[in-house]
Amino acid sequence: MPQNEFKISRFIARILSFEEIAEFTKLAVANGITKVRLTGGEPLVRKNIVELVSMLSKIDGLEDLSMTTNSLLLSKYAKDLKIAGLNQIKKGDVLTVAEIAGIQRAKRTGELIPFCHPLQLWKIDVKCTLQEKGVEAECTTLCFGKTGVEMEALTGVNVALLTVYDMCKAVDKEMVITDIRLVSKTKK
């Protein structure tokens, strides 16, 4: 048992104050815990989250401060959170689900777009990454044949981004999907 105790007088369904979180973190660090992850619901909807991160990052002995989030609100705060001392941001399953959705739809592009016939694709790779201004999706497709696969790649990107939008729309009402384009096309 730890020698120090942190008591909450009674359970109240409320969000802990910054001071309570800082006190709890100090107690954890004093007992050998060096990594803390902010999670529980959606940390980014909390007012002054950057201030909280700044406060916690100054606690002596805390080596790693991270956050779990499933929201595109992150794009609004990412730079400030990093400056405040956040070491890592763990994005929930949103990006993975978006990548899977992009792959699934790229395979079925012929069913979505008139006169776009089904292709036997050899490779579909969808990568979604969190950038400072939001999520970037990239789709790479490969097919051996006399036809291009740009429609499949464009479909993969669009569906991946639509999936991110769908999963985060309740939290961020200002999301915009933009700048979708064919980056390169190589015919061998």
Image: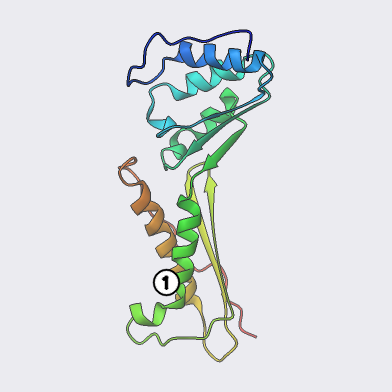
Looking at the picture, how far across and down is residue 173, in whole percent? 30, 42
The image shows residue 145, relative to residue 102, as above or below, that is: below
Q: Residue at left 39%, top 26%?
A: 46
Looking at the picture, how far across and down is residue 89, in whole percent? 55, 37
Q: Residue at left 34%, top 77%?
A: 112
Of residues 21 and 188, which is closer to you in this image?
A: 21
Q: Quadrant of residue 184?
A: bottom right
Q: Quadrant of residue 40?
A: top left
The image shows residue 186, relative to residue 98, as above or below, that is: below
The image shows residue 95, relative to residue 119, as above or below, that is: above
Of residues 5 and 166, which is closer to you in this image?
A: 5
Q: Amino acid at mark 1?
A: Arg
The image shows residue 57, relative to residue 153, as above or below, that is: above
* Left or right: 30 in relation to 166: right
Looking at the picture, how far across and down is residue 3, in whole percent? 63, 8
Q: Residue at left 66%, top 16%?
A: 31
- Evaluate whether residue 181 shows in this view: no
Residue occupied by mark 1 = 105
**Label 1: element kind:** helix
